[in-house]
């Protein structure tokens, strides 16, 4: 990894030299645009609208236009701004970690100790961990003043830049103002469906299926050319889903039954009209199996005396 920033975390008189590294990376397949008719690469050029000349990237500056005048801002101008020159990650305050809404998180960066001794780094890490606090910090990064959360991630300190409060939109949807009544049975079944999907989160078990399929398609085209039958390679496209649920209770019951599968799922669907949840139905299925087993045992046990009873019945009939 290559450091994208170098400076120090400061809180009080404590100074923690660090290097900043991007904690995430993009693995998406890179595609570019081509002319559909002949496959020619489409390229964009930066052209000056005054003289029509193509301008090299190093000759381009930024500008602000207020509608009447234009002010040119050079890279040198930006580098001289006090905030941009700052090499500090300034701790503003320490807050309970739970108070930071995840919607505010933007980009993530690792902090590496950058001094002969990492004692100050370890001290800050263990302090945050033992107090369950997150440090709110200010820093200048890539020509922007950033608000960020400095927290512990395993054995490393990390900084997650935050959106400013006015950058988070309010969820103003009229439908949310409507009064909706949820019955006890609906809530009960919904909780059962949640419980059937409860697990410990392991991000490694999830993969980007779209990118995998895209790579498969690219490889197939490299081997077979444009004549490839995409439908044969990936199968027919399924019907679009997402229709509005009319009978919520029935949808919940079927979802629970589908999760159970086998005989449990069938029993769940047959008992869908009852108001009881799916859990009692599963117990009933088990009891039914148990009763059937007992009946089988009784019939096996009764197999011996059966012939003795039959002659008695014939004798009675003869008399």
Image (tube, helix red, strand yellow):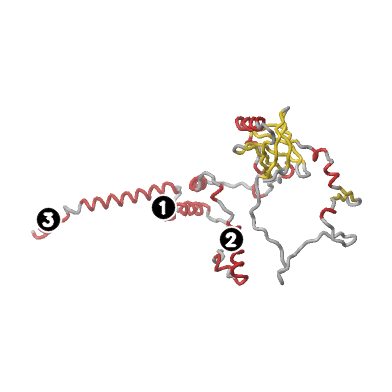
Element class at badge 3: helix
What number is the disc on residue 264?
Answer: 1
Crowdedness near tag 3: few (<14), some (14–19) or many (≥20) residues, C-alpha within 10 Å: few
What number is the disc on residue 44?
Answer: none
Crowdedness near tag 1: few (<14), some (14–19) or many (≥20) residues, C-alpha within 10 Å: many
Q: Quadrant of residue 101?
A: top right
**Quadrant that contains the C terminus:** bottom left
Viewer-proximal residue, 127 or 14?
Answer: 14
Q: Quadrant of residue 266?
A: bottom left
In the shown orientation, is residue 13 left or right of residue 52? left
Element class at badge 1: helix
How many numbered marks have been drawn onto this rendered protein structure?
3
Q: Earlier in the sequence, mark 1 or mark 2?
A: 2
User: Percent x, y for residue 148?
Assistant: 70, 39
Task: Report the residue marked by disc 2.
Answer: 213
Residue occupying the point 71% across, 69% down? 39
In this orientation, does residue 146 appear? yes
Task: Report the residue marked by disc 3.
Answer: 312
The residue lying furthest to the front in this view is 116
Viewer-proximal residue, 123 or 128?
Answer: 123
């Amino acid at each position: 990894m290559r450091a994208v920033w170098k400076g120090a975390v400061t809180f009080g008189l404590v100074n923690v030299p660090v290097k900043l590294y991007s904690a995430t990376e993009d693995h998406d397949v890179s595609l570019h645009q081509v002319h559909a008719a002949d496959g020619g690469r489409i390229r964009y050029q930066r052209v000056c609208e005054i003289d029509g000349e193509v301008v090299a990237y190093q000759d381009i500056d930024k500008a602000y236009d207020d509608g009447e005048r234009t002010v040119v801002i050079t890279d040198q101008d930006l580098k001289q701004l006090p905030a941009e020159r700052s090499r500090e990650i300034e701790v503003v305050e320490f807050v309970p970690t739970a108070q930071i809404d995840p919607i505010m998180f933007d980009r993530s960066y690792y902090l590496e100790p950058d001094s002969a001794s990492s004692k100050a780094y370890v001290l800050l890490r263990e302090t945050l961990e033992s107090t369950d606090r997150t440090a709110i910090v200010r820093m200048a990064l890539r020509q922007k003043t950033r608000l960020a959360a400095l927290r512990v991630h395993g054995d490393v300190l990390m900084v997650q830049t935050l959106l400013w409060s006015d950058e988070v939109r309010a969820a103003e949807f009229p439908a949310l103002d409507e009064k909706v009544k949820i019955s006890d049975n609906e809530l009960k079944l919904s909780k059962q469906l949640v419980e059937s999907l409860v697990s410990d989160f392991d991000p490694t078990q999830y993969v980007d299926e779209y990118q995998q399929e895209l790579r498969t398609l690219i490889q197939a085209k490299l081997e077979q050319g444009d004549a490839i039958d995409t439908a044969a390679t990936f199968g027919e496209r399924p019907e679009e889903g997402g229709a509005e649920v009319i009978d919520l209770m029935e949808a919940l019951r079927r979802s629970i039954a589908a999760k159970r599968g086998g005989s449990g799922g069938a029993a769940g669907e047959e008992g869908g009209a009852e108001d009881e949840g799916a859990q009692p139905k599963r117990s009933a299925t088990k009891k039914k199996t148990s009763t059937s087993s007992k009946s089988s045992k009784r019939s096996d046990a009764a197999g011996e005396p059966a012939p003795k009873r039959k002659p008695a019945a014939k004798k009675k009939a003869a008399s």
